[in-house]
Image (tube, grey):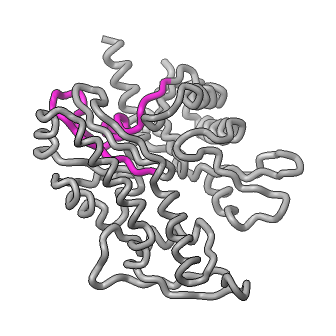
Amino acid sequence: MAKEIGIDLGTANVLIYVEGKGIVLNEPSVVAIDTKTDKVLAVGTEAYQMVGRTPGNIRAVRPLKDGVISDFDMTEAMLSYFMAKLNAKGVMSRPNIMVCAPTNITEIERKAIIGAAEKSGGGKVYLEYEPKVAAIGAGLDIFSPIASMIIDMGGGTSDIAVLSLGDIVASESIRVAGDKMNADIAGYVKREHGLQIGERTAEQIKIKIGTATPLDDPEEMEVRGRDNFTGMPRTITLNANEVEAAMHDTLAQIVNAAHQVLSVIQPELAADIIDRGVVLTGGGALLRGMDKLISGHLGVPVMISESPLDNVAVGAGKLLEHMHGVQGK
């Protein structure tokens, strides 16, 4: 029997979960290509280290944008590379694959994701919506008649959903997430400090001192970049509250989307959510104070799942096992 694998094909990272082994691969969704020959030079972690540092003939591309495929050939090359890496580890050939996608994708985007997974060496490919899969990965019992609410903040999209009886009751997917926060930070530093920084530096700032709520005693960090006016390298000191100010509007959009979902569900389900609370998952869940920000605005308890970065990949694998378990009976 073919092995089951779950793939979280994310804008920022690709994670692969293999039945019985757990997460076997977690690498950035980046491909480095030689523009003269169109040859793929590096994929994943190795390619990510090249972002913003490449000479003229090498380009580091991120084949997924806003949670969907923006460059089909590159996505296929990246997935094939990752699958080959697993095969080299002797995982399996032509496995069943469960891939995840944001809730608002079009039919064309859907077919592109399935096509890329099939071409990279998958047997049967299934596609499921991200928040549903993330909820399973976070350990929620979505098959019960009691509602669960999940907010999955990734790199390209934030997916919010209320689930009951194994399916999505109401959902919202906005193309505002980690990447947008990085862009906000880079924009703020340029505006307020006259310093240009790259996307990797912006991400480091977010991880190190980022906060969703203003702090009384904000942490500080030295940031290096290029001066806007002189063009020379320069170092500034940035504090956590400045990072919060930079990301404020983006975070407000995520909170509003969650508000939107809660406002359209049936009263019985809303009552369940007051009891059970909301679960945060995805990289955005790791932002300091994100749980406080959301519970303050929604008035319901908010928990952060145990390993927010792995939930989608683990959930995809588990859902596939569950499906075949049900069919096999």
Res 108 quadrant in image: top right
Residue 297 shown left or right of residue 256 in the figure? left
164 within the magenta span: no
Residue at (30, 27) in percent of width and height: 167
Placement of the C terminus among the 4 image quadrants: top left
257 left or right of 43 in image: left
- Along the viewing direction, whichever of 215 and 98 lies nearer the viewer: 215
Residue at image coords 33%, 24%: 322
Viewer-side residue, 191 vs 21: 191
Q: Residue furthest right?
A: 36
Q: Which residues are magenta?
A: 126-154
Q: Position of residue 240 (x, y in %)?
A: 39, 78
Left or right of residue 123, residue 176 in this image: left
Residue at left offset 37%, top offset 26%: 321
Viewer-proximal residue, 32 or 294?
294
Question: How far across and down, in percent of the image, does residue 222 sit?
Answer: 51, 85
Tag count: 0
Between residue 198 and residue 245, name the one nearer to us.
245
Residue depicted at 50% across the width and 44% down the height = 15
Q: Quadrant of residue 81?
A: top right
Residue 130 part of the magenta-drawn span: yes
Residue 51 appearing in the image: yes
Give x and y (percent) for residue 163. Answer: 26, 33
Q: Is residue 117 visible?
A: no
Picture coordinates of residue 162, whole percent (x, y): 26, 37
- In the figure, is residue 82 to the left or right of 253? right
